[in-house]
Amino acid sequence: MNDTNNNRGRAPRPSPTEAESGLLDATVRFFLEQKLVVALLVIGMVLWGIAVAPFDWKTDWLPRNPVPVDAIPNLGENQQIVFTEWPGRSPQDVEDQLTYPLTVSLMGVPGVREVRSQSMFGFSSIFIIFEEDIEFYWSRSRIIEKLNSLPAGAIPDDAQPALGPDATGLGQIFWYTLEGRDPDGKPMGGWDLHELRSVQDWYVRYGLLSATGISEVASIGGYQQEYQVDVDPEALRAHGVTLAQVIDAVRKSNLDVGARTTEINRVEYIVRGLGFIKNLDDIEQATVRAGPDATPVRVRDVAHVTLGPAERRGALTISGAEAVGGVVVVREGFNPLAAINNVKAQIEEISPGLPTKPVVDWDRITPAGVEAFAAEAGFEGLDGAQLNREAWLDWLRTTPRDEWPEWITTSRLSIEPFYDRTGLIHETLGTLNDALVQQILVTIIVVLVLVMHLRTAFVISAMLPLSVLFCFIAMKLFGVDANIVALAGIAIAIGTIVDMGVIVVENLLKHLKEAPPEEPRIEVVARATREVGSAILTAISTTIVSFLPVFTMTGAEGKMFIPLAYTKTFVLVGAIIVALTVVPAATHVLIAGRTDVRRGQRALWFGLGLVAVVVMAFGLHQGWGAVVAAGGVLLLLSLYHLVADRLPLWAEKFRQGGEAKTRRILEALSKYGRVFGSIVAIAVVTWILTVVWEPLGPEPEFIGNLLFVALILGGVLGLFGLFALAYRPLLRWSLRYKPVFLLAPCVLVLWGAVIWLGFDRVFAFVPATADRTGMGA
């Protein structure tokens, strides 16, 4: 009575469930009540994730901006290169007058950790290593500022430092050669190395440099064609001309000079002196000086002018034969796969402009025969000792190929790749893509077998693709590039994602089973989610925190493993978001709903049925049997769920009508329909896994692969089933005999310590065997 009086006038104490009003509870309640927001969240996550996914998915209906992807992580240092050419100087002169002053000056650039240099004959290379946190292009701007602010006389006037391309050592993504091809596309020679190098330097290189994301296209092989002036010393002495005068005459002859304007008849004319060299005769006619009798001394009087190859320090060979090609280097921070695709698109654009030349098989015909044939056709076949290319090309282009003589054909230059990182990137992505797909399929099978409830398995399995797509979105936002190590973090976290879904859904099913019928289902779902929400957050937080030491790594090991830590953290965070926002709402709609929700369920299954029809039609059009089968199974499941609520009513009507056989069939469908649907889904997913995985390879028959997959999955699940049967007796025995059971972990710890540290270090406290030397004498 006193307690009653003391409590009179006070508000009743709220229950623990009603008192919970934290951020987690408010979040769960909001998304559980606002299912439209959940639907928009899922749709946005799917579309955004597909748009930024690193895989080469062909989605013309959706703009793509994928995560930068490469086959392997870039472990190189944060480095910039300053290259300075000083022709004709010895390595010691380059070191003393060029490399040393530049090295001392560049050491003062902000963020520099180390400066390395190399002096060679005629050039200097300085490698500037920056701290890892220094931005790549910021460091380039600081170097340019330092080079532009060098004091006068710090380095020789004829040496101009140049900053290397904005790329890293891993930037070489595409190598190619220039090769001649006949009209049938077969290899065809006919091109000199200097011709190939000229086409590469003045056409192909500039065309590929215009591709988006390309930093540099370096030419390799062949000979650079140049004008060569071979001076005769005796002629110089005879004409009284010095070598410097010849050099100055050649230099001044290759100029265009402006002379302002002049007015004639009230018309103003621009006066120019045209002097650019176009052929050998232009150099030969250049005046060196006037002789004593005003006779000009020309270059041809003291030198011999020819076309020749420039001196080279290397060559490119393919299968033992010299070739001409180039190396395409991607810009730092750009997507290598997108850059390669841009280069290939540019190759298709410039390929029609590559030159073509006629090629004559001189083993089959003589020059006189060529000239006679051309005369009959009405054109000049030879231009001196050389083939008249333009005339022959005009005739070949206007003449059908079947009328060409056997001894002549055309050779058209073609850009042929011999190193293309696209294949390596696609193999890497394909391997990880297959691994993720197989993991998801195996997980779906395991969930279906253990739960034997199709809608529950669907809710749990949907967490996998949603979490992976969320990871791709986070990688794009945080600038984490995709490679074989980074994407492996997603594969590692697959099991943890499913664990969260199983925990949430299992607790929801338990509460739904135990809740009174009159309690609103949404309250049951909210209570069940709150009950395990904090535990899930704690468990995942410990996993994420355990990766903090990985985020502190530096150097090559940091560049390799930090992306893996990021991707695993992203996918776990995505799993938490999906588990606490999407899963409760989906469970309430698909599993816990009553009459008002069943309408939504029927609408959902009706929509899935329409999707199944579209999928089957598309599969039939493309000839894909797997797609047709999957669409058929989805259509059957949709039809079943559309009539599942009607089956008990139909069974009652048939009971009243006395049709026993049909009644029993309908009762069985009503009772075992869900289990049957789960079994069908298990069979379909196993079949798809067999087709995707092919564990025994493509050569064995499908039945062999299917039996192997079924054996592996059945064996693993059977072992877990046996453990589940033995778990309760084992738990009772362990709790009854605690000291005996605790010996097992102690033995394991001791055994592991001995294997790790060695017997002598673990048992160092045991005294050594006594030395009996000299005893018993």
Image (tube, rainbow, N blue to C red):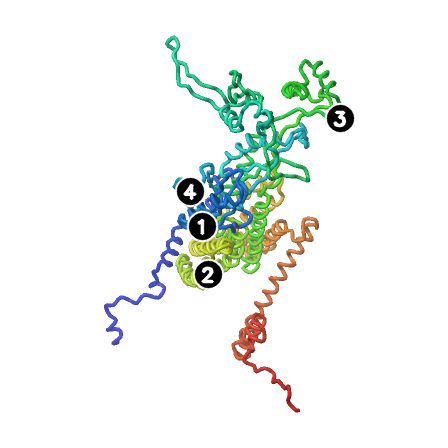
| Mark before the other along the chain sequence, 1 or 3 | 1
Residue 454 coordinates in the image, percent (x, y): 53, 54
Residues 763 and 344: in front is 763
Marks 2 and 3, how far apart in space? 73 Å
User: In the picture, which quadrant includes the C terminus?
Assistant: bottom right
Q: Are marks 4 and 2 in contact (CB under 8 Å)?
A: no
Which of the two discs, 4 and 2, sits closer to the camera? 4
Q: Are marks 1 and 3 in contact (CB under 8 Å)?
A: no
Residue 318 vertical position relative to residue 411 in the rendered view, above or below: below
Q: Is residue 566 left or right of residue 304?
A: left
Task: Report the residue marked by disc 4.
Answer: 154
Please identify the quarter of the rendering in which residue 257 is found.
top left
Q: Which disc, if any, is residue 243?
A: none
Under mark 1, the amino acid is Phe
Under mark 3, the amino acid is Asp
Under mark 4, the amino acid is Ala
| Mark before the other along the chain sequence, 1 or 4 | 1
Which of the two discs, 4 and 3, sits closer to the camera? 4
Residues 641 and 345: in front is 345
Secondary structure, mark 4, is loop
Marks 1 and 4, how far apart in space? 24 Å
Which of the two discs, 1 and 4, sits closer to the camera? 4
Q: Which disc, if any, is residue 130?
A: 1
Marks 1 and 3, how far apart in space? 61 Å
